[in-house]
Amino acid sequence: MIQLTTINPHAAQPVSLIALLHSFRRNHRLIMQMTRREVIGRYKGSVMGLAWSFFNPVLMLAVYTFVFSVVFKARWGASAEDSKTLFALVLFVGMIVHGLFSEALNRAPALILSNVNYVKKVVFPLEILPVISIAAALFHSMISLGVLLIAMVVFNGQLHWTAILMPLVLLPFVILTLGFAWMLASIGVFLRDVGQVIGMVTAVMLFLAPVFYPVSAVPENIRPLIMANPLTFIIEQAREVLIFGHLPNLTGLSIYSFVAITVAWAGFALFQKTRKGFADVL
């Protein structure tokens, strides 16, 4: 049974990192319960249910493999020795990372707007709504990742041991995404146009990240723009550990993690400072 924490929606809320960690500890069971409900609810009423979360990425990977390795005969980089399926696998890694980011951020501006009852009629820890949304998106990303790993074994006959380091690569990215989600969930209450804008932004970021092309293929004068995209580094590191069997850039991950924690803290602080006005606006 879900237990709700007693919170005054109009009271000032703590914004420290300690308060953030305490919120996770206090509400972890509620987060798990609502994430499960979110995932199951997405497929409620369908015949195959959760099986769709597996078959969707299988279908997409099959389409990518056919289009890019058979129709376009695309190769990753300039090497003619690349396997026919390498481009599809490399592309799928980028799509998984972008899919997690875009799903979480596209939903964020409407999180409070679509849960008005939690703001007005019941006492609820609103700060966990973006966490639940990202946890549900992460579940589907893990299913897609599982499909990718199976495909690598089928196509290449091997799986690099460095694949076990993928959580190390994804963790700072999830933290950064959570920070943006808190910001957008807060701003979306007061500026309803944010929901429309963020959809365009995430679509543009797909093409400004090395999803369909390697960074080396980008002209030098444009490369700083590509590298400034928060997706770029994570996509590159995910490919290193999953596809190429290389160790991740630990120095780069450390810097990225510091930035991610800073953004998450800023997003949490903004959410906590503005949440007392949610009830009045809604």
Image (cartoon, rainbow, N blue to C red):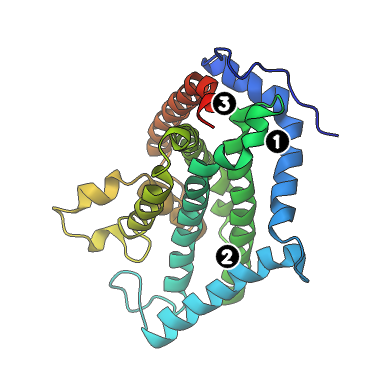
Is residue 165 visible to us here? no
Q: Is residue 152 left or right of residue 53?
A: left
- Where does residue 156 sit, x and y in percent of width and height? 55, 73
Q: Which residue is mark 3?
A: 279
Q: CA distance from mark 3 to mark 2?
A: 44 Å
**Which residue does the image show at 53% across and 18% down from the upper left?**
17
Q: Is residue 79 left or right of residue 267?
A: left
Task: Quadrant for the N terminus, please.
Answer: top right
**Which residue does the image show at 59% across and 28% down from the upper left?**
127
**Which residue does the image show at 56% across and 54% down from the upper left?**
163
Q: Amino acid at mark 2?
A: Leu
Q: Which mark is residue 31?
A: 1
Q: Kindly indicate whether the residue at mark 2 contacts the one at mark 3 (C-beta within 8 angstroms).
A: no
Which-is-in-front pick, marks 3 and 1?
3
Q: Which residue is mark 2?
A: 148
- Where does residue 140 sit, x and y in percent of width and height? 62, 56
Which-is-in-front pick, marks 3 and 2?
3
The relative height of residue 143 versus residue 195 in the rendered view (above or below) is below
Number of disc labels = 3
Q: CA distance from mark 3 to mark 1?
A: 22 Å
Mark toward the start of the polypeptide (3 vs 1): 1
Mark toward the start of the polypeptide (2 vs 1): 1
The relative height of residue 78 versus residue 1 in the rendered view (above or below) is below
